[in-house]
Amino acid sequence: MRRLVLGIGNRARGDDGVGRLVARLLREKLPSDITIEETEGEATAILTRLDGIDAVHVIDAARSGAAAGTTLRFDVTAAPLPETLGALSTHGFGLGEAIELARALGHLPRIAIVHVIEGVSFETGAALTPVVGDTAFALAAHLAAELATS
Amino acid sequence: MATRTIKVDYLARVEGEGAFKVKVRDGRITGAELHIFEPPRFFEAFLRGRAFTEAPDITARICGICPVAYQMSAVHAMENALGIRVEGPLRELRRLLYCGEWIESQTLHIYMLHAPDFLGYAGAVEMARDHGGEVRRGLSLKKAGNEIVSLLGGREIHPINVRVGGFYRVPTKRELAPLAEKLKRARDLALETVRWAAKFDFPDRARDYQFVALRHDREYPMNEGHIVSNRGLDIAAADYEAHFAESHVARSTALQSRMTDGSAYLCGPLARYSLNFDRLSPLAQDAAREAGLGATCTNPYQSILVRSVEVLYACDEALRVIANYEPPDRPAISTPVGAATGYAATEAPRGMLYHRYRLDADAKIADAKIVPPTSQNQASIEDDLVSYVGGWLDLPEDELRHRCEQTVRNYDPCISCSTHFLKLEIDRG
């Protein structure tokens, strides 16, 4: 089974890069057969990476007004990302569109989970908010355990 | 007074965020205003005090869609300041890199952002459900562009291998060989794209645009050339600011650029094509003619077709560069430093991109000016809407909004560059 962990975001814009931080934290922790990649979030770049993948865990930032560091998990094989979440994504033609394009084209992996972490600071050059960083470490630890046994 | 207001609160399928307002009084259009409200991004200020060598990597961060354009304008302006010219294989590799960006950026716009307008879908996702084969073709074509940028730029987004004087590392012939095979396939897909786009139902519109683009003595313009227009302008990049002026308009956080006489002008695919048709490869010229295009194109709705011709040209040109490639002795030429000012304009996918840098004696950047294509096209976007909306006022509100959005999308506006984009409001009073 081909498995992929995909961190999404812009590392130059504060909490927007938290998905990529999680991907980096997992580099030393996952079985070697799991591919780990990062991308800025443009839909076709995500879509290309899903090609031929059986199971994917995507990690992205969100800006929904929830408490900073809040995490949500979505099984997008069962339903699209909630519309409200799509609007909360920091990427215009991004993850939500990539998932639905993959579904329409028959490319959506059999297992497809999206994890989002609520951020607060998305300004150019901003630092990662400490509580968001703490959440990234916690989510990475959780995923490392889950993927090691699945 | 009979008045009417139409609002579109969010214009989808453009790069960024902004708004548009059209004023209608007694059935007549009295004004159109582009509102750009994302905070300005201050990149020109970020650059001050930084080493001249940092400009390519800093400016590449302005846009995730066209970073190569920013890098190319930056390195050419720096080289102009330092009095050096990059020639031979290094110059050709830069052209190849630019081909990669044209392929990926133009294809993204054609298939994912603009084609849904012509085929009657809300977006690419809805279009993919009925036109999966076409969407797959677009993805494959775009991927070929990504692979050029990855190989030459070091990575797909925000490439890091470009430097003043050349590259940090250049590819071997063996590394380029597999790319050529993929590009041959991509060229076929690009030709199919031209034929596909030629069948779209284009609104019968044309305007007497003041086209502005680069023109080179033998190439279709990417990295260099004189700035020319269809009204007789023919200047070097160093004279840009004597003929073009940016001004702040209250409704926009992006500066708006016009000719110094106040007139609007158009840069981008239509201008580039109409001023340089004779510089396209025979394959691209033939495909354009077969698609029904003449040597000039003044219908903004056919910009998707012109873009597809340019993608075909970029595939063809990339293959030419790879076929003739002999690796240079060094990946970069040396760069003497000193106080100087440099200028450059290159052709980003969506239009001309001007950079000017003033360097102090330590070759630190004392001042920078960057004029992205969407800033230059803002006035033309407004003029298009003023010209066309009047004919659509009897349409149902949703359809009217859609026509306006489609009109703006003709420009592939990259508000990420100029700042960010776009809501639409039509004020009927």
Image (spheres, rainbow, N blue to C red):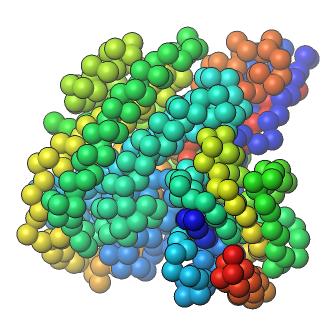
Please tell me which residue lies in front, B358 or B106: B106
In the image, residue A9 above or below residue A146 = above
The answer to whether B164 appears left or right of B405 in the picture is left
Choose between A46 and B315: the one closer to the eye: A46
- Residue drawn at x 69%, y 28% is B121
Compared with B41, A26 (above or below) is below
Q: What residue is at 33 percent from the left and 75 percent from the top? A: B52
Does residue B61 show up?
yes
Q: Tell me the quarter of the picture where residue B186 sits.
A: top left
Closer to the camera in the image, A11 or A33: A33
Q: Is residue B47 above or below residue B13?
A: below
Counting from the top left corner in percent of width and height, residue B114 is at 58, 33
Residue B28 percent across, percent down from the top left: 76, 15
Q: Is residue B84 left or right of residue A150?
A: left
Residue A51 percent location from the top left of the image = 53, 53
What number of labels is visible? 0
The furthest residue to the right: B1
Q: Is B70 situated above or below B302?
A: below
Please give the name of the residue rendered at 31% of the width and 46% of the height, measured from the top-left corner: B182
Residue B227, can we see it? no
- Specify whether B215 is left or right of B211: left
Q: Quadrant of the C terminus of chain B?
A: top right
Check the picture and name the quadrant holding the N terminus of chain B. top right
Seen at 11% across and 48% down, the residue is B324
